[in-house]
Image: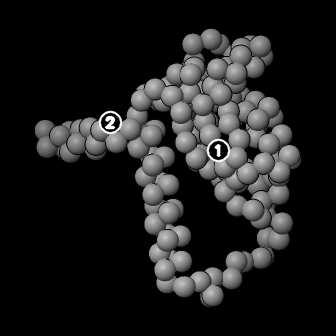
Amino acid sequence: MSKGSGQGSSEQVREVALEKYVQPALRAGKKQFSVPVKDLIRDLVSQGFPRGNTPQVCTALRKKEFLRAHGIEIEAVDGPPSKMSTTVVFRYRVASSDVRPGTSRPESENEQTDLSSETPEQWAHRMTGKLYGLMKDEMAAFGGGEAFLRWVRSEDEDEAA
């Protein structure tokens, strides 16, 4: 794939999502908020974005760098199994309370959380929660668990051939 106008369009998707949905939610102090793809596409088309690029919009809203840069996580993706439709709604949550609204920087860059008082049980719960969330998002990106497994198996079949 070339890095042409498609990448610029994806960046436009993220900029509009940031301006219309993410920043207002963070400024309002919300811990959770939603981005309906249909509404975002309407906003994009009014700015000259080509119609019919729903998969690009859905993919752009999942980009890990976008999520990390704004201190948010995907909580759920509602919609059809493909997760590539105008009926999709991305549900986000604030990932870290030390990220200031509208920025990607913590309040105190040198501040570290005190994990020395964390029990082994709390540590295990925190770590498995992160893994669960990671796999949930990855599987959702492929359209669910079965589609993810088909993708994994197709890689094995390609190497065997």
Q: Which residue is mark 2?
A: 147
The amino acid type found where label 1 is placed reads: Tyr
Distance in Å between CA atoms under marks 1 and 2: 23 Å
Residue 27: where, in percent of width, then height?
86, 47
**Secondary element at image label 1:** strand
Residue 140 horizontal/vertical position (percent): 45, 40
> Residue at position x 47%, y 75% from top?
124
Q: Is residue 67 above or below residue 142?
A: below
User: Which residue is at a point 53% across and 70% down the rendered structure image?
Assistant: 126
- Tell me where residue 84 appears, x and y as whole percent: 50, 25
Which residue is pictured at 76% across the width and 40% down the height? Answer: 22
Mark 1 or 2, which is nearer the eye? Answer: 1
**Mark 1 Cα-neighbour bin, 10 Å: few <14, some 14–19, many ≥20:** some
Of label 1 and label 2, which has the lower sequence position? 1
The answer to whether one can see residue 80 in this image is yes
**Res 154 quadrant in image:** top left
